[in-house]
Image (spheres, grey):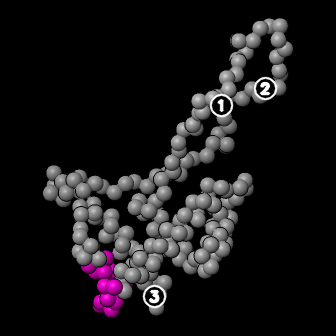
Amino acid sequence: MWEADEVMALALAWINSSEDSIQGGGKHSPEFWVQIRTKFFALMGRVEYRGNDSVYNKWKSLRTQITDFTAVHTCVQNNRKNGMGDADVLEACLKQYKALYNKDFSMLDVWRQCISSPKWHTVPTSSPPRSSKRSKTTSTLADQSPSQPMSDGRCQINLNELDPELIFDEPDELPRPLGRDKAKAAARGG
C-alpha cells in the first residue's frame, strides 16, 4: 500500500526526471526509471525498499487517474456556468469523476503538482471561428437608401473603451523548459 507522501514523491521524481533539459526525452526506458527511482528514494530519505515493477506500475496507475481527472476538469472548466468559481469547478469535477469512475479522486495535491509542471500544463487553444461558404450577407447603413426606415435598436458600444474592471487577465503560461541543445551549450559554458 502506497502512502500519500510516497505518491507525491513519485510524481515529483517523474516530473524532475522528465523535465531534464539535457537528456529528458533522450533516455532509454531503463535509464529513465533508474533515475526516477533514485530521485524517489532520495525524496523519501530511505534506502531502496520498492522494486522496479512496483514503482513503474504505481506511476502507470497514477498517470491514468491524473489524466482522467484532467479530462474531467477541462470539460467542466470549458462548460463553466456563470458565477462558478474555481472551488465550484473543483467540486463539480470531483462529483463528475465519481459518477464516471465509481470512486473518489483522492490525489488533488498530486494532480495540482503535476498540472503546474510545463509537461502537464494545459495550453489554452483558441481557434478562429469558422465561416461557412453560405454565409448570409448583411447590408450596412451606407448601402441603405435614405427612404428605408432605420432601426434605432442598435447598441452603440465602443469595444476599445472597456471599463478596466471588466478586463480579465489571461492565465499566465508556464515557461517552457530549456531545450536540449541550449541546455547542453549552457552546461559546456558556451
Residue found at x 33% / y 92%: 49
* Amino acid tagged 1: Leu
According to the picture, the residue beneath numbered tag 3 turns out to be 2
Q: Nearer the viewer, mark 3 or mark 1?
A: 3
Front-lying residue, 1 or 41:
1
Q: Which residue in the structure is indicated by mark 2?
A: 154
Q: Main secondary structure of the magenta part?
A: helix
Instruction: Report x, y in % for residue 93.
Output: 63, 68
Viewer-proximal residue among 108 and 53? 53
Q: Secondary structure at mark 1?
A: helix
- Pointers 2 and 3 in contact (C-beta within 8 Å): no
Highlighted magenta segment, given as a residue range: 34-53
Q: Is residue 189 magenta?
A: no
Q: Secondary structure at mark 3?
A: loop
Q: Which residue in the structure is indicated by mark 1?
A: 159
- Are there few (<14), some (14-19), or many (20+) residues within 10 Å of tag 1? few
Amino acid of disc 3 = Trp
Report the residue at 29% width, 90% height from top: 47
